[in-house]
Image (tube, coloured by chain):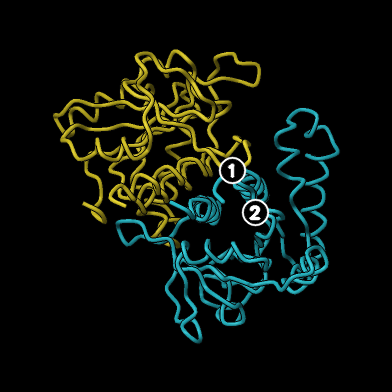
Chain colours: A cyan, B yellow
Amino acid sequence: MTNSPFDNLYVALVHYPVLNKRGKNIASALTTIDMHDIARASITFGVRGFYVVTPLMDQQVLAHEVIQHWTEGIGGELNPFRKRALDLIRVVSTFEDAIMEITQERAEPVITVATSAAKHEHKNGRTITTREFANKLNSKDSHLIAFGTAWGISEEFIQNCDFMLEPVYGVTGYNHLSVRSAVSIILDRICKRDM
Amino acid sequence: MTNSPFDNLYVALVHYPVLNKRGKNIASALTTIDMHDIARASITFGVRGFYVVTPLMDQQVLAHEVIQHWTEGIGGELNPFRKRALDLIRVVSTFEDAIMEITQERAEPVITVATSAAKHEHKNGRTITTREFANKLNSKDSHLIAFGTAWGISEEFIQNCDFMLEPVYGVTGYNHLSVRSAVSIILDRICKRDM
């Protein structure tokens, strides 16, 4: 299965509910470079769709403006590679909306997977490694990995997902990668599922 | 050797000589988010120093302002994790300056390694995989990996390096990751050298 795109893998970048620095639930603002970097990583590793999840209407408008500039506007003419990447982006109000859309697209159950830079105890011990997750992709089910902006997705959100991925451990104990880096590393690791 | 930081690994983000879209050599402008993301990835994976290479004085001033804000200014107070990461950054005018500084720091030969999203024929066939490079880190030599901004480091620069790393291949043939993603993935792969 190596080197074939995943027709059952989706990525979500979650802007609500996420934590602020003090651990309170907030809706975070869009960071447009997240859209670019994660779309580029998604297309590189064969992800089927990349959901930008935000309930804030003004942030949805901004997301659509960025996408339009690069897919239909002058950006797409100047940089066709960027156009291909940003074509993957789908803007939705809630994570549930993403799940519903995927269900319509593939007519299979959607397995949801949370990520966090910090170690959490997932209910029922459902924390899995990247390799275990990669093996799950061999099933017909759809799979949606959620990445949090700001200080990470909320505890309740994590517990509502079917599984949780182990954090990306480096070598120094420092665990404050950008979400752009975390998505890139995790997709690269998943892609090596047969190694 | 897994899970110990690398005291002989350095990263350079090169702003000259790099290519523009038409393949001409230019000096690119600083992208401050590159500094943040690459510093955070560097500290995560135990890199000893992260060189921002730019001959442009105004860009050096900007780089120092960003570093100062986050290491000595209010940014460091608000976010001590960011301070730790940005403390790794060293601003130099040329790649040769970085090599000289590393030589003074470790008194060992500096092995230089170029990266590119595109496949190049390196002189003497010195293109190596991430795993081969990771094995080299077991020697005493210092190692400096160069990442290009804009459309990548120039051909002459690549040929002047001792080795060249294989591009990061995904699964779709799309090879236009951001430099932030490429650095993160390559450091993660190197870190898994004993796997």
Residue underneath mark 2: A6
Q: Name which quarter of the figure residue B129 lies in.
A: top left
- For the residues beneath circles 1 and 2, the answer to whether they share a chain is no
Residue occupying the point 39% across, 23% down: B93
Looking at the image, which is closer to me, A22 or A88? A88
Question: Chain under label 1?
Answer: B
Question: Chain under label 2?
Answer: A
- Label 1 neighbourhood size at 10 Å, few (<14), some (14-19), many (20+)? some
Q: CA distance from mark 1 to mark 2?
A: 9 Å
Residue underneath mark 1: B171
Residue occupying the point 54% across, 14% down: B25
Q: Secondary structure at mark 2?
A: loop
Residue occupying the point 42% across, 55% down: B82
Residue occupying the point 66% across, 45% down: A43
Q: Of the residues shown, which amino acid type is indicated by label 2? A: Phe
**Up/down of A50 relative to B104, above or below:** below
Q: Secondary structure at mark 1?
A: loop
Q: Position of residue B29 (x, y in %)?
A: 56, 28
CB under 8 Å between discs 1 and 2 = yes
Q: Position of residue B21 (x, y in %)?
A: 65, 21
Q: Which mark is residue A36?
A: none
**Up/down of A169 relative to B177, above or below:** below
